[in-house]
Image (spheres, rainbow, N blue to C red):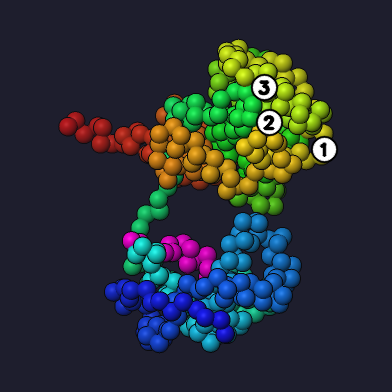
């Protein structure tokens, strides 16, 4: 058996909230949940050989790729712990699962300043164990009362409001747009792609996974019947709340009041670069961008020249592909994580704390800014595809805690 890190995490004084059987077994646990790299790799290899096919067959169509990746890591962690403790992972004993979750709950960060794992992470680990058992036709050990009580005890003793990402309201969004690379080569390529990403994510109230999945084929060009201005309709085939794509959700991106904050202008300018690259190659794109070096930023709308989306040709060309530091456009789309990292990076360049922002800041920013601007709940819910008004009200309270609040009528 490979060596496993036996460093004990400090015992928490909240073990009393756990079932007696779990507390008793915890006293005899020899290993923590942190394993060395070699042991972890051995478990991964074993998982790949023996269980990946079954797990993939049963879960691939039912779970998102991100969920499958998380379940895979969670199951690997549980298997490694079972190997170190000499216990069976499949089928697992309910008490072993409960003890494992309790060990996870008392693990600390390397600098011992905080808990290593949040209660929500432990619940996901329990879900992963249940999923693997279900994929093998086995009853889930997580349904046992000892596991339920353990999770309940962890939640009670580890109460902490989740830290939400700060919303990007319009003024902050403009600060991020101003922090983009300068026009020209090579930074001008990322400058235009990132403008489209930030503005589309904000105006469309899109999640980072939805942004990363977009292709040119998902876009349709329409006309605003009132103004005659171009409008882009974005089809969302699958989303977090509609993973089977049954609702055929879509969002509309109208022409903005100003060119610098206009989604359709950003799409027009980015489409031109992608078209040059696809038709004439990377050298032609570089020459084109060098010709823009030092050119003044135009002030008039460029989307008035957008009459068709010729890049929507059925090939599934990614709308937001990777762009390297040399200004080269990749063939694959950005990952959802890269979307979140991009928001953090621009927040830091704008002088903000990057830890306060992430991919969800764009979606949260839409709801917050719309509430600040007086939009009705129904309007916010329609664009953001929210079905629960309480979610929107939470953003409204964030925007203005005195809005619709009786404290303003107390006469104080």
Find residue 13 and report its image quarter. Answer: bottom left
Residue depth check, mark 1 versus mark 2: number of the one nearer the observer: 1
First of labels 3, 1 by sequence position: 3
Identify the residue position indicated by label 3 in the image.
290
Percent from the top left, x then y, of residue 199? 57, 30
Q: Which residues are magenta?
A: 113-126
Compared with 288, 59 (above or below) is below
At horizontal 68% and vertical 18% (from top left) the residue drawn is 291
Question: If the image is split into quadrants, where does the N terminus sit?
Answer: bottom right
Compared with 241, 76 (above or below) is below
Percent from the top left, x then y, of residue 60? 70, 62
Q: Residue furthest top?
A: 300
Residue depth check, mark 3 versus mark 1: number of the one nearer the observer: 3
How many residues crowd around disc 3 within 10 Å: few (fewer than 14), some, or many (20 or more)?
Answer: some
Numbered label attached to residue 34: none
Q: Secondary structure at mark 3?
A: helix
Instruction: State yes or no: residue 115 in magenta.
Output: yes
- Asked if residue 27 lies left or right of residue 322, the reply is left
Find residue 14 and report its image quarter. Answer: bottom left
How far apart in space, not on screen, are marks 2 and 3 (Cα)? 32 Å
Numbered label attached to residue 233: 2
Identify the residue position indicated by label 1 in the image.
314
At horizontal 68% and vertical 27% (from top left) the residue drawn is 270
How far apart in space, not on screen, are marks 3 and 1 (Cα)? 31 Å
């Amino acid at each position: 058996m490979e060596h496993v890190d036996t460093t004990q995490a400090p015992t928490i004084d909240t073990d009393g909230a756990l079932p007696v059987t779990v507390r008793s077994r915890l006293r005899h646990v020899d290993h923590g949940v942190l394993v060395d790299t070699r042991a972890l790799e051995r478990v991964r290899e074993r998982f790949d050989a023996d269980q990946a096919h079954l797990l993939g067959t049963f879960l691939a169509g039912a779970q998102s790729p991100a969920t499958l990746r998380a379940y895979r890591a969670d199951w690997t962690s549980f298997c490694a712990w079972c190997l170190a403790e000499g216990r069976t992972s499949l089928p697992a004993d309910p008490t072993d699962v409960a003890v494992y979750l309790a060990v996870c709950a008392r693990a600390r960060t390397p600098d011992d300043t905080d808990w290593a794992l949040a209660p929500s992470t432990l619940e996901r680990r329990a879900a992963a164990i249940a999923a693997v058992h279900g994929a093998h036709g086995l009853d889930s050990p997580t349904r046992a009362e000892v596991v339920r009580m353990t999770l309940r005890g962890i939640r009670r003793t580890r109460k902490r409001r989740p830290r939400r990402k700060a919303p990007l309201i319009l003024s902050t969004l403009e600060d991020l747009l101003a922090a983009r690379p300068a026009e020209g080569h090579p930074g001008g390529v990322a400058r235009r792609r990132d403008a489209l990403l930030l503005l589309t994510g904000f105006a469309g109230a899109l999640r980072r996974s939805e942004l990363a999945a977009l292709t040119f084929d998902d876009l349709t060009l329409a006309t605003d019947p009132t103004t005659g201005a171009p409008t882009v309709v974005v089809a969302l085939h699958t989303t977090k709340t509609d993973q089977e794509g049954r609702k055929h959700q879509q969002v509309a991106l109208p022409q903005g009041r100003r060119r610098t904050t206009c989604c359709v202008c950003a799409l027009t300018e980015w489409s031109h670069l992608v078209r040059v690259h696809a038709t004439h190659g990377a050298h032609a794109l570089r020459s084109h961008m060098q010709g823009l070096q030092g050119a003044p930023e135009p002030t008039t709308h460029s989307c008035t020249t957008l009459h068709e989306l010729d890049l929507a040709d059925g090939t599934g060309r990614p709308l937001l592909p990777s762009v390297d530091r040399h200004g080269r456009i990749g063939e694959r789309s950005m990952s959802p994580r890269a979307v979140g990292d991009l928001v953090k990076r621009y927040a830091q360049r704008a002088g903000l704390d990057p830890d306060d922002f992430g991919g969800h800041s764009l979606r949260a920013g839409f709801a917050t800014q719309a509430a600040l601007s007086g939009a009705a709940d129904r309007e916010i819910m329609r664009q953001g595809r929210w079905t629960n008004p309480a979610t929107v009200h939470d953003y409204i309270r964030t925007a203005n805690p005195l809005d619709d609040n009786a404290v303003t009528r107390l006469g104080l």
